[in-house]
Amino acid sequence: MNEPRVYKHSPFQFVVLILMFGFILVAMFFNMDLGDGSMLIPVAILLLVVIISITSLTQKTIISEDEISSQSLLGTKTLRWSEINRVSGRGYSIKLHNLDGDITVVPSPNLPGYEEVVESIGNKRPDLFNPREYDELKSGSFPLLAGLIFTVLFVGMFVGFGLLLYNSPDAAPVMIAPLIIFLVIIAVFVGMMFFRPRSLVFDGRSMSIKYFLSEKTLLADEIQSVQFTFQRSRNGKIYFVLLHLVNRKSVRISGLNPSLPVVYLVLKNWHKQNK
């Protein structure tokens, strides 16, 4: 029998976190006025951040042949693979529920190897991700609202920038540079909103990917593989689904409900059943 696979943060990260916050707390203690009650506020905030960080770093996901467990400082929740009745989620998370709904196992997306955890769930219970039950996967209303807001901002800034140049042809570059940078940032956000899929619709062996201004149809035979992957950023991992096409191009999928891991496993099963 294979040994259970444990996904957890490195102990080194935990030690570095404790030392860093300990150093900050000691420095604050020696530099604060003990008679000034207002200094207790930043100390309390720091302690809260420490508690949240420790809780996050002590999370574990344990996978065996028979069951899956999620563990934290608050306790351990375990479900046998056969006990999982339905799945849900939001964003990058996937939640596993039993029939009664009193036990929910939630693997942390921040754990190293999270994509392997998602793969294991899909391999153990592929029946939970039947494309017939997810014939259409949509994004929420927030991306649409955000896209409209950023579009209005972009147009407004573009017009304002044009008027500034028209009325002040001799304006110093140092005054114009921040506006240019802000305009570029807004343009990037607008581009991301318009090029992010709004929905996926399955129709037998074909799949329609609907965007804000266009629609693309792909046959299962045109897709070489479906991958759940990520890229690192300053804010942590950014997960997405990548469709590798036969013509060596790729299509990136993100931001769809119910959650990205569920979308990936549904896509993977649809491709497997129809290629």
Image: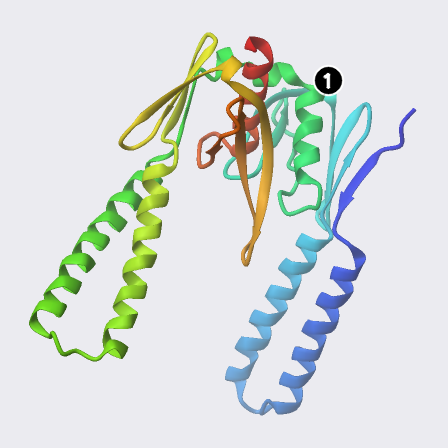
The answer to whether 10 appears left or right of 91 in the picture is right
Q: Residue furthest left?
A: 167
Residue 25 location (% of width, % of height): 66, 79
The answer to whether 58 appears left or right of 42 in the picture is right
- The residue under label 1 is 82
Quarter of the figure with residue 85: top right
Residue 163 location (% of width, % of height): 10, 65
Q: Does 145 appear above or below 210?
A: below
Residue 221 location (% of width, % of height): 52, 13
Quarter of the figure with residue 145: top left
Closer-to-camera residue (6/154): 154
Q: Which residue lies at the image location 44% right of the left edge and 15% below the top edge? A: 135
Image quadrant holding the N terminus, namely top right
Closer-to-camera residue (138/58): 138
Q: Which residue lies at the image location 53% right of the left edge and 20% below the top edge? A: 223
Name the kind of residue labelled 1 in the image.
Answer: Ser
Q: How many numbered dots are placed on residues in this image? A: 1
Image quadrant holding the C terminus, namely top right
Q: Residue furthest right?
A: 1
- What is the secondary structure assignment of the residue under circle 1? helix
Q: Which residue lies at the image location 11% right of the left edge and 74% below the top edge? A: 169
Local crowd at mark 1 within 10 Å, few (<14), some, or many (≥20)?
few
Q: Does 225 appear above or below 256?
A: above
Residue 95 location (% of width, % of height): 60, 32
Q: Which residue lies at the image location 57% right of the left edge and 91% below the top edge? A: 35
Q: How is the image coloured?
A: rainbow
Q: Residue furthest front?
A: 247
Quarter of the figure with residue 214: top left
